[in-house]
Image: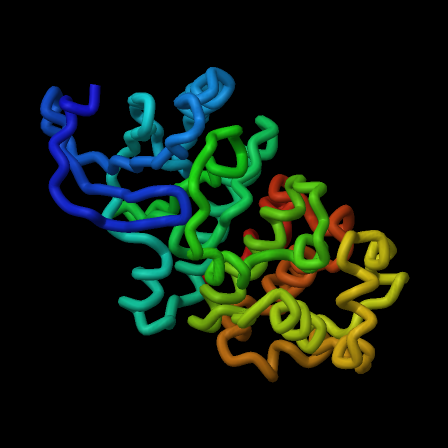
C-alpha cells in the first residue's frame, strides 16, 4: 500500500506523472515514487499493464534502476524505484560539461550494458536522454524512467514535455516511422555519447523539421544508398520535398575530430563508434551488444 511510503519532496515531473522522494517506513530506505495519473473516464488500470510492469521487476541488472514495488488504485498507479539523487544531465552541468575521456568511456560502457540487457529481453526504453540516466554515488550509470506510457497500455494524460526528447529522436521516427525497435534506442545512445564529449546536445532542434535539418547538416544529406528506406515513411514525401531539405550538405565525419571540440577525447575509435551508432538506416546501426565489443572500449585513458 502507498501508506507504507512517506512522501518527502517532489523531485521531478514528467510526461506521465510526478516523481517524489520518499521514505519506505518498513525499511527506512529512501526511494523514488513515480505517480502516474490515469484518465478518469477509463476504468482503472488494464490487467495487461499490471502484468507488464511486474515483468520490469524481473529486469535486474546493475545498470538499470531497480523497480521495487507497484501500487495501484482506480485513479492512480504508483511505481516505487530505488532512489538516486543525480542524473547525467545534472552531472554534466556540475562538471560544466567537461568530462574526462576515462569517465566518458566508463559511462558509455554502463549505458550500453543496460541497453543491451534490455534489448536481449525484448524491452525497449524509447526515451533515452541524460535526464533519464541516473548516476550512483559509486559513479555507476543506470537506466531509469522507462517509457511506461508508451510501452504499456496505460490510459494516461499526455503533457507537453516532449521537446527535450525530440533531441534524441532518430530520423526515421521524425519521418513518422511507427516501427519501434532497438535501433531507436541506439540512435539516442549515439546522441548521448556525443553530448558527454562536448557538454552540449548534438541535435538541439526546435521542432521535427529543424531537428531533421540539424541531422542532415551534421551527417550529410542522405540518399538511397546510405538510407534505403528514407522514402518509405509516412511523412517522407511531405517533409523531404520541402526546399530546405533539397540542399546538399557534405558529411562532417571526414574532419570531425578537428572540427568538433571535445571529440578529441573519443579518439578515432570513439568517433568510429559514434558513426556506427548514428547511421540513417535503422538496420545498419550497430547493436548495443556489438558496440560493447568495439575497439573504443579497449582504449586506455
How many numbered marks have been drawn onto this rendered protein structure? 0
- Screen quadrant of the N terminus: top left
Left or right of 12? Residue 174 is right
Task: Determine if residue 296 is in view.
Answer: no
Residue in the image at 47% along x and 16% along y: 47
* Image quadrant assignment for residue 126: top right
* Image quadrant assignment for residue 208: bottom right
In-front residue for pair 172/76: 76
In-front residue for pair 130/156: 156
Above or below 54: residue 250: below
Q: Position of residue 217 (x, y in %)?
A: 69, 77
* Image quadrant assignment for residue 247: bottom right
Residue in the image at 63% along x and 50% along y: 294
Residue in the image at 61% along x and 29% along y: 122
Residue in the image at 49% along x and 69% along y: 201
Left or right of 182? Residue 254 is right
Q: Position of residue 3 (x, y in %)?
A: 14, 23
Amino acid at each position: 500500500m502507498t501508506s507504507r511510503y512517506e512522501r518527502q519532496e517532489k523531485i521531478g515531473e514528467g510526461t506521465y506523472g510526478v516523481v517524489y522522494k520518499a521514505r519506505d517506513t518498513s525499511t527506512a530506505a529512501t526511494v523514488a515514487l513515480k505517480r502516474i495519473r490515469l484518465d478518469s473516464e477509463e476504468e482503472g488500470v488494464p490487467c495487461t499493464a499490471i502484468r507488464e510492469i511486474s515483468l520490469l521487476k524481473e529486469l535486474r541488472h546493475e545498470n538499470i534502476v531497480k523497480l521495487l514495488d507497484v501500487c495501484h488504485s482506480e485513479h492512480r498507479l504508483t511505481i516505487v524505484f530505488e532512489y538516486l539523487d543525480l542524473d547525467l544531465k545534472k552531472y554534466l552541468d556540475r562538471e560544466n560539461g567537461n568530462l574526462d575521456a576515462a569517465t566518458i568511456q566508463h559511462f558509455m560502457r554502463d549505458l550500453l550494458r543496460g541497453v543491451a540487457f534490455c534489448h536481449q529481453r525484448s524491452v525497449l526504453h524509447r526515451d533515452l536522454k541524460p535526464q533519464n540516466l541516473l548516476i550512483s554515488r559509486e559513479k555507476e550509470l543506470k537506466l531509469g524512467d522507462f517509457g511506461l506510457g508508451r510501452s504499456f497500455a496505460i490510459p494516461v494524460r499526455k503533457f507537453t514535455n516532449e521537446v527535450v526528447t525530440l533531441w534524441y529522436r532518430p530520423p526515421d521516427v521524425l519521418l513518422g516511422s511507427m516501427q519501434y525497435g532497438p535501433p531507436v534506442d541506439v540512435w539516442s545512445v549515439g546522441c548521448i555519447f556525443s553530448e558527454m564529449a562536448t557538454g552540449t546536445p548534438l541535435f538541439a532542434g526546435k521542432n521535427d523539421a529543424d531537428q531533421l535539418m540539424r541531422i542532415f547538416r551534421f551527417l550529410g544529406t542522405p540518399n538511397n544508398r546510405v538510407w534505403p528506406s528514407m522514402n518509405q515513411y509516412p511523412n517522407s514525401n511531405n517533409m523531404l520535398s520541402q526546399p530546405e531539405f533539397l540542399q546538399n550538405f557534405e558529411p562532417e565525419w571526414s574532419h570531425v575530430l578537428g572540427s568538433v571540440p571535445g571529440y578529441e577525447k573519443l579518439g578515432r575509435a570513439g568517433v568510429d563508434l559514434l558513426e556506427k551508432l548514428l547511421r540513417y538506416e535503422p538496420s545498419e546501426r550497430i547493436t548495443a551488444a556489438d558496440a560493447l565489443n568495439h575497439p573504443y572500449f579497449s582504449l586506455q585513458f
